[in-house]
Amino acid sequence: MRKKSREMPAEWALEVMRKAPYITVSFTRADGTAYGVPLSLASNDGQVWYFHCATEGDKLDAIAAHPDVCLSAVTKCVPTVGPKDSSFTLQYRSAIAFGRAEVITDEMEKVQALRIISTRFLPRHMDAFEEAVHRSLHRTAVVRITLATPPTGKRKQYDSQGEEMKYGRME
């Protein structure tokens, strides 16, 4: 990380990932080209993350060729004018993590992963979960991403006096 003064601890970075409406997952295609796509990921423990997709396509082809992936998330992204120097800048909270992606083949694990995803994004509709899974499980792929190391976090944020909060300082 170039600006160490903006670095935040792993637990903070996990919270950014948990709150982000989507996480961009970057893959490497078989021909070596990059492929990044924002996805709705969910996790119970912060170590293993899940997403679902169609049973064929670019994501699955890339995972088959190169299972190592990069995850990046951003929250609280606000363009602003620097309070002390009037610079045009951006306040943000971000996290990045690296992991290995695998397509889940065990049906029970697929259902459990879909439950984790659905609980995160549709908690008020879990009464319809069983029927939805029964209807679509055969045409749904589920991918597990296991983080290789804890995520790293970074932020740029000003306090109420207009001072940038550096070195992990919280307000």
Image (cartoon, rainbow, N blue to C red):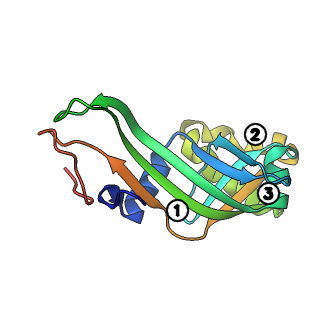
Q: Disc 2 marks which residue?
A: 132
Marks 2 and 3, the one that precedes in the sequence: 3
Quadrant in the picture for the N terminus: bottom left
Can you see residue 114? no
Which amino acid is tagged 3? Ile
Would you name the residue on which mark 3 appears?
63
Q: Could you classify mark 1 by the number of other residues whose Cα lies within 10 Å: few (under 14), some (14-19), or many (20 or more)?
A: some
Numbered disc 2: secondary structure: helix
Q: Residue at x 66, y 55 (%)?
A: 50
Q: How many marks?
A: 3
**Observer-nearest of 62 and 40:** 62
In x, y percent, where is residue 26?
67, 50
Q: State the SS at label 3.
A: helix
| Mark 1 / mark 3, whichever is N-terminal | 1
Towards the viewer: 94 or 89: 89
Mark 2 near mark 3, Cβ–Cβ under 8 Å?
no
> Whole-Å distance between the Cαs marked 2 and 1?
26 Å
Q: Residues within 10 Å of mark 2 (few under 14, many from 20)?
A: few
Mark 1–mark 3 Cα distance, whole angstroms, equals 21 Å
* Tag in front: 2 or 3: 3
Q: Quadrant of residue 169?
A: bottom left
The answer to whether residue 43 is above or below residue 54 is below
Per the model, the C-alpha gap separating discs 2 and 3 is: 26 Å
Residue depicted at x 68% and y 56%: 113
Identified at 62% across, 44% down, the residue is 118
Q: Amino acid at mark 1?
A: Gly
Q: Earlier in the sequence, mark 2 or mark 1?
A: 1
Q: Which residue does the numbered mark 1 point to in the structure image?
A: 46
Question: Is mark 1 in CB contact (under 8 Å) with mark 3?
Answer: no
- Mark closer to the observer (2, 1): 1
